[in-house]
Image (cartoon, rainbow, N blue to C red):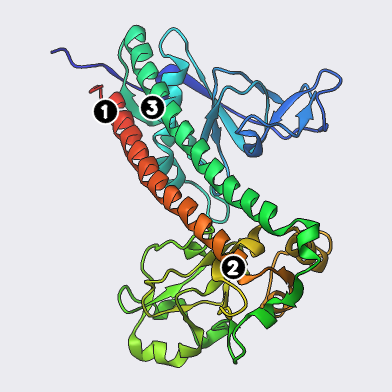
Amino acid sequence: MTATPTARVRDVAVFIKGKKASVTLDSPSDGALPYVLIEGFGGAYKTFTNDPGCVRCYRDDTIVVADGANTGLTSATHEGYLASTLGALRPDRSKINHRYLFYFVHGNFKTLNTKTRGAAVPHLDKELLLDLEFALPPLPEQERIVRILDEAEALRRLRLDADTKSWTLIESLYLRTFCQAENRQSWIAESIGDMAEQRDGSIRTGPFGSQLLHSEFVETGIPVLGIENVVTNDFRWTAPRCLPLAKYRQFERFRVFPGDVLVTIMGTVGRCCVAPDDLPLCMSTKHLCVITPDRSKVYPRFLWAALLFDPAIRQQTASVGGGAIMEGWNSTIIRQLTLHVPPLELQNEFSDLTEEARQLEAAQAESRQRLDDLFQSLLHRAFQGEL
């Protein structure tokens, strides 16, 4: 069998860096075209320009993030002007199918993202990108491979759409069940402080400052929970970060119990989850506010949904933040948030329906992971000349 020839990216494409527009517009008037930013990678453009000094990009180009934390992220099918934080690989169509090039660079995100230049702000290593080597079969064979990868990508998108609809279902169920004005008029308004267990530390944040240093974390011991465990709005185990039992004893007041509601209050603010029933001995960090609800008043899953979806809660947090979602919360702010509390029976019905939806999401997550693994396998085989 004849070996598939190989090529480097520089052999089949040129790299073009974007430029900052001297003028931007909110609509495509006066002959303006989309000013392509990373925010527009989904195809929804909010900024436009007719600056002739900008760099054009075309639908066949592979757009690559060239600066910042997302360096190496790719997108395609854009027609407009290229922002200064982006670059474009323009393919030689006589040598390579533009989608074949896109999929190859897309599959090398981790390499491009971790091998950057610059200390403070990461920058794309253009030479590394251009020197990436891959199998380059004849154009008809490239087209066959692209069809396979397109089909696999379509399956992944369908899975993602289903996941989004599951989340929307829970929000719609909450709004429909608890946010009708005629219902709320008969429900008592209580603060989250009133809904928490009436004891010291039922709403808590910390440890703070020098009480707990990163250098004290170990790989085994008592898990320490942070933003990464909450950021998806559902509890997730991540890479272990623990404390020895003896050190944990100093922080027992920050223990997280099954059924506690965890809220992010620094960095990514306002994400929320419920600690699972099988949670082992754990503690929180200063990036979380932990609420132990009084279950004679409020179900944890209802409180979780209220913090995420309730318009009244959003209005209160926005007003505290000066008209926008607050950049940082604290336990005092959360304690004072007020909510109309429905009967426990209604909360329980909502919790049961939400649990069914979450079980569906868990099955979908497994399916999504299998599709992601399949897609990565196809990418690897395609550019090794094995597909």
Going by the numbered disc 2, the residue's amino acid type is Glu
Give the SS element for disc 2.
Answer: helix
Q: Residue at 46% across / 25% down in the picture?
A: 102
Instruction: Tell me the quarter of the image containing the C terminus.
Output: top left
Query: Where residue 374 sits: x, y (%)?
Result: 31, 34
Relative to the observer, which residue lies in front, 231 or 7? 231
Circle 2 is placed at which residue position? Answer: 345
Q: CA distance from mark 1 to mark 3?
A: 14 Å
Q: CA distance from mark 1 to mark 2?
A: 54 Å
| For discs 1 and 2, the disc positioned in front in the rendered view | 2
Give the SS element for disc 3.
Answer: helix
Dot 3 crowding, Cα within 10 Å, few <14, some 14–19, many 20+: some
Q: Quadrant of residue 4?
A: top left
Going by the numbered disc 3, the residue's amino acid type is Ala
Query: Where residue 264 sits: x, y (%)?
Result: 59, 67
Circle 3 is placed at which residue position? Answer: 152
Going by the numbered disc 1, the residue's amino acid type is Arg
Circle 1 is placed at which residue position? Answer: 381
Query: Where residue 44 sits: x, y (%)?
Result: 68, 32
Q: Earlier in the sequence, mark 3 or mark 2?
A: 3
**Residue 210 visible in the displayed image:** yes
| For discs 1 and 3, the disc positioned in front in the rendered view | 3
Q: Is residue 1 left or right of residue 278?
A: left
Q: Residue at 52% across / 36% down in the picture?
A: 161
Give the SS element for disc 1.
Answer: helix
Q: Residue at 81% across / 33% down in the picture?
A: 24
